[in-house]
Image: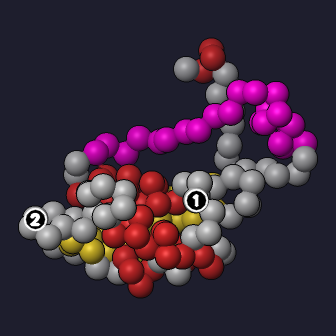
Amino acid sequence: MSTAEVYAGVCGHSAIIEVTKVDDKHVQVVIHSACEQITAMNPDLARIQWKGKGHQVFKSMTESVVYQSAARHIRHTACPIPAAILKAIEVEVGIALPQDVTITFTNSRSNPSTTLRAGLQTPNFKPQTPKDK
């Protein structure tokens, strides 16, 4: 099983995405979150074909079962959860390495220290500085 933890941002919701390879062509995705929009995707992703003729996952965004489910259930189009689901599937089936993905805003209006002072703390988040890279 591959597990991804996602801290979505200002909405305050986080998610744990668990992907399990069921057989050579299918995976099961289970999302744990306090966000009802995200967890509403679970039935759609309970058994999806990622490989072979008729696969449902690695297609264009409008044809991927993950993004089709997100379009039905998630109202915030910039939600990072669908991309995280796809990354977790890639890791579980062995076509990608488990590498963290980061979105960092660098303008003064979204300075992480300002956000943290505002009380919107993200667990385990340490902003990277240029010297950390």
Density class for disc 2 (Cα within 10 Å; few <14, some 14-19, many ≥20) is few
Specify the amino acid type for callout 2: Gly
Tag 1, which secondary structure? Answer: loop
Look at the image and tell me whether residue 32 can be seen: no
Picture coordinates of residue 10 (x, y %)? 75, 54
User: Taking 68 as reference, is 8 left or right?
Assistant: right
- Expressed as whole percent of the image width and height from the top left, the position of residue 120 reads 82, 52
In the rendered structure, the answer to whether residue 53 lies left or right of residue 14 reads: left
Please give the label number shown on residue 42. none
Q: Which of 37 and 102 lies nearest the eye of the viewer?
A: 37
Residue at the (37%, 76%) spot, across then down: 45
Which comes sooner in the sequence, label 2 or label 1?
2
Q: Which residues are magenta?
A: 96-117
Question: Residue 108 in magenta?
Answer: yes
What amino acid is at disc 1? Answer: Thr
> How far across and down, in percent of the image, does residue 132 sit?
60, 21
**Quarter of the figure that contains the N terminus:** bottom left
Tell me the residue at 63%/63% (across/down).
Answer: 76
